[in-house]
Image (cartoon, helix red, strand yellow):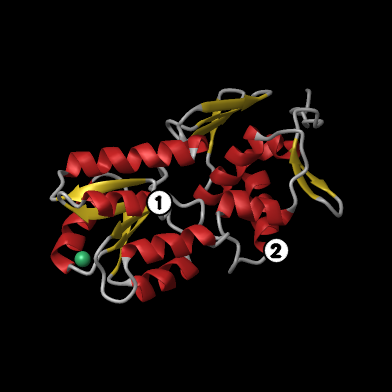
Amino acid sequence: MKHQPRVLIVEDEPSIAELIAVNLRHNGFQPTWAEDGVAAQRELDAVLPDAILLDWMLPGQSGVALAKKWRADARTKAIPILMLTARGDEPDKIMGLDAGADDYITKPFSTQEMLARIRAVLRRRAPEQVNDSVSIGELVLDAATHRVTWQGQPLKVGPTEYKLLHYLMKHPERVHSRGQLLDKVWGDHVFIEERTVDVHVKRLREALGVAGAMVETVRGAGYRLTAQAVIPTAAQG
Ligand code: CA
């Protein structure tokens, strides 16, 4: 249930890529591997990762050329890039950072160092991913444990509905268009229809039970989570 950050590994040496992937997987990340810039671009077109580990020396386009390209592209420019460089290549590091890399890791590197650097760039880029708790009225979402409660009672909320609820609760009393929700909750709406939002809002309302009334449809505009909603109370005897 915990959010597993996606990390795209762009590395032409299979043994290094495999080692990195295994370590990432064991530490709660979802790694994918691309052996060159063409394969990496294909991955990025399909789904945007939370971070990119980019080797400096690649067949075809170099890591620096790719970093520059992705920084110039509106779709990919916000993704943290960590360059993998060989020991002692000081000019490489400077060029890599100039090209838009967020950090660099010198080979050979320890797993702990790699994980620490990835976590650091994720924290800097995506503070909203930091686990915390948010409550609106009697609806409480605890991001550390992924639990949602209403009046202290746990609710069963699916993973996508959870992400949607988290976003709405962090930005309450405000109307969000379907397009905005796709951007913020799904991260990348290139291949997802806006109707998908309606489906998940419906499921979210069902999961919330009576508190589902807090998720309002704003005709022609989108959705809003509000503490002002009239919550149906249990029938009185
Ligand atoms: Ca290489």
- Neighbour tally class for label 1: few under 14, some 14-19, many 20 plus, Cα within 10 Å: few
Give the image quadrant in which the ligand numbered 1 is located.
Answer: bottom left
- The amino acid on which the numbered mark 1 sits, given as a three-letter code, is Asp
- The amino acid on which the numbered mark 2 sits, given as a three-letter code, is Arg
Residue closest to the eye, 228 or 27: 27
Residue under numbered circle 1: 98
Residue lying at the far front in this picture: please name it.
91
Residue 76 appears in the figure: no
**Helix, strand or loop at disc 2?**
helix
Q: In this view, does 135 lie above or below 218?
A: above
Left or right: where 172 falls relative to 60: right
Residue 138 percent across, percent down from the top left: 65, 23
Residue closest to the eye, 90 or 189: 90
Left or right: where 154 falls relative to 124: right
Residue closest to the eye, 66 or 211: 66
Residue closest to the eye, 102 or 125: 102
Residue 187 percent across, percent down from the top left: 55, 54
Q: Which residue is drawn at 43% across and 30% down?
A: 144
Q: Is residue 228 above or below residue 10?
A: above
Q: Which residue is drawn at 42% across and 49% down?
A: 80
Residue 106 percent across, percent down from the top left: 20, 48
In space, the residues marked 1 and 2 are separated at their CA atoms by 41 Å
**Helix, strand or loop at disc 1?**
helix
Left or right: where 176 falls relative to 182: right
- Neighbour tally class for label 2: few under 14, some 14-19, many 20 plus, Cα within 10 Å: few
Label ID, residue 195? 2
Pick whichever of labels 1 and 2 is earlier in the sequence: 1
Q: Which residue is drawn at 49% across and 69% down?
A: 45
Q: In which image quadrant can residue 1 be found?
A: top left
Residue 121 percent across, percent down from the top left: 39, 41
Q: Which quadrant would the C terminus be assigned to in this image?
A: top right
